[in-house]
Image (tube, helix red, strand yellow):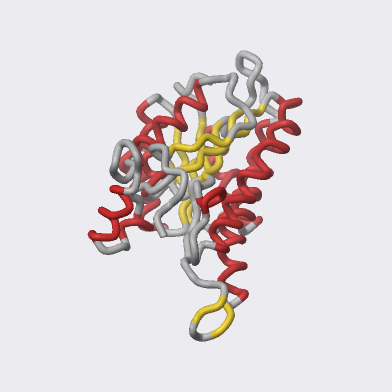
Amino acid sequence: MKLDGVAAIVTGGGSGLGRATAEALAARGAKVAIFDLNPVIAEEAAKALGGLAFAGDVADEAAASGGIAKAASAHGPARVLVNCAGIGVAKRVVGREGPQPLADFEKVIRVNLIGTFNMIRLAAAEMARLEPIEGERGTIISTASIAAYDGQVGQAAYSASKGGVVAMTLPIARELAQFGVRVNAIAPGVFLTPMMAGLPQPAQESLGASVPFPARLGQPAEYAALAIHIIENGYINGETIRIDGALRMAPK
């Protein structure tokens, strides 16, 4: 899909992987709407890109539906959706204070998995009504993680949520094929995102050094470059693509 003049939505677009992806889309002429729970960073990013900002919870049906409608009113119906909104909470299933609170697990699943599905279903319903451009009506990318395959201690909720993203990508791609809508996912490894930036510098360096090659943390722009390639390459469909420097097992 050619991006010049195309309306695009990026969730979690105020920072990290989402911000980099929004920048890459805008650089190719896309009209970008940024969804983020934090209204301040959403507005700042949108202003820098000449786009739109909408603050809201991707797992909230009314908020997501309203944001999509407002973006369509300003930019036209979105033909591109990139789901980058997500959270990570590291907690053991059984810790010193007893079992992990169920609410913690539910929150991660709600944002990372239900929020992703919510945006997919709402955006896809609009894409299915559009006139095709060179046979394609839209393309959707979700953010999984290598934790879907190589989850570590404390990542039960996060791994479950990202595993769900991986598992639903192919069946949704097969279902939406009839409308000319492609669905893919990206599974990043250890990337320099706000989530990672909260760790002490020695921990960040240790994680980067664990990557076979290149031995460093991934850069958000590298995620964005892959997202752009998936969007522009019309034969990629139903895939979850790892981008992790060959890291197959995160450090303990």
Q: Position of residue 162 (x, y in %)?
A: 57, 51
Q: Position of residue 27 (x, y in %)?
A: 35, 28
Q: What residue lies at 59% left-to-right and 19% top-to-bottom?
A: 235
Quadrant position of residue 40: bottom left
Q: Is residue 124 left or right of residue 15?
A: right
Quick check: 180 above or below 14? above
Quick check: 62 above or below 104? above
Can residue 22 be seen at all in this image of the molecule? no
Quick check: 65 above or below 78? below
Q: Position of residue 29 (x, y in %)?
A: 40, 25
Q: Position of residue 61 (x, y in %)?
A: 66, 56
Q: What residue lies at 49% left-to-right and 51% top-to-bottom?
A: 85
Residue at the bottom extreme, as displayed: 97
Quadrant of the snapshot with the C terminus: bottom left
Residue at the left extreme, as displayed: 201
Quadrant position of residue 51: top left
Q: What residue lies at 57% left-to-right and 34% top-to-bottom?
A: 78
In depth, the one of 208 and 221 nearer the eye is 208
Q: Is residue 142 left or right of residue 21?
A: right
Q: Is residue 150 left or right of residue 53?
A: right
In depth, the one of 84 and 223 nearer the eye is 223
Can residue 28 be seen at all in this image of the molecule? yes
Residue at the top extreme, as displayed: 134
In depth, the one of 107 and 145 nearer the eye is 145
Q: What residue lies at 43% left-to-right and 52% top-to-bottom?
A: 250
